[in-house]
Amino acid sequence: MSAPPIPEIERILFTEEQIERRIREVADEISERYRHGDLKLVGVLKGAVFFLTALARAIRIPVKIDFLSISSFSTRPAAPGVVRIAKDLDESIEGEDVLLVEDIVDTGFTARYLLQTLAARGPNSLAICTLLDRTPRRIVQVPVEFRCFEIPDRFVIGFGLDYKQFYRNLGYIAVIKPDWEQRGFNL
Ligand code: IMP
Ligand code: MG
């Protein structure tokens, strides 16, 4: 592969082809698991948008989609933030099979908060599907039902993941250089 076009990138972790192939595999699992269900994909803006659309197109059963966005506040850099919903879902999830679609589960705070909040709304079932899972940094345990890739303890960009809101549109997922990395984790 030719050199990465962006100077902040150290190396490409997953190419566009690898990501597409893996999403198809996970989409097959989901299609099988929910074939008798009433599946709604709930995406967390903005990071999960790219993954959710790719996943939805690879799923072979009818799905609904909805989005929410969260904001997190932390009192000091790199401290686990307090999460709240900034933009809520458009529709009720009562009685539905809900798959919460995340770009990455890192410390687990965001996922745990969203699971608790959505569970209180009476879905028929609720599970997480994440593009990336970084278990070495997990602080609170959350059940991750479907994951595309497990990643090492490095800050990544691309396929929805940002560094200061940039690079979400990269088709691949890349690790950024160590001198940028600390700033990434401290955003
Ligand atoms: P958690 O609450 O610590 O699990 O944080 C998850 C959120 O942090 C994700 O939805 C991302 O928005 C952000 N995040 C965590 N790690 C990275 C990364 O490596 N690159 C870009 N965003 C990240
Ligand atoms: Mg982010």
Image (tube, grey):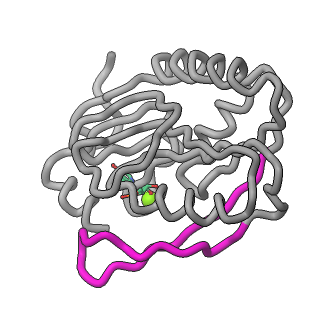
**153 and 114: which is toward the camera:** 114
Q: Position of residue 128 (x, y in %)?
A: 55, 43
Q: Give the residue drawn at x 66%, y 42%.
A: 99
Identify whether 105 is placed above or below 80.
above
Task: Tell whether position 47 is magenta.
Answer: no
Q: Which residues are magenta?
A: 65-88
Q: Is residue 86 magenta?
A: yes
Residue nearest the observer in this picture, 94 or 63: 94
Q: Is residue 172 left or right of residue 8?
A: right
Task: Note whether 60 is above or below 42 in the view shown.
Answer: above
Say which residue appears at 83% left-offset and 61% top-offset: 92
Q: Quadrant of ligand 2?
A: bottom left
Along the viewing direction, whichever of 52 and 14 lies nearer the viewer: 52
Q: Nearer the viewer, residue 100 or 7?
A: 100
The quadrant of the rendering that contains the N terminus is: top left
Q: Which residue is at 60% across, 41% downward?
A: 50
Quarter where residue 91 is shown: bottom right
Can you give x and y, in whole percent of width and height, for residue 95 in the image? 82, 50
Quadrant that contains the C terminus: bottom left
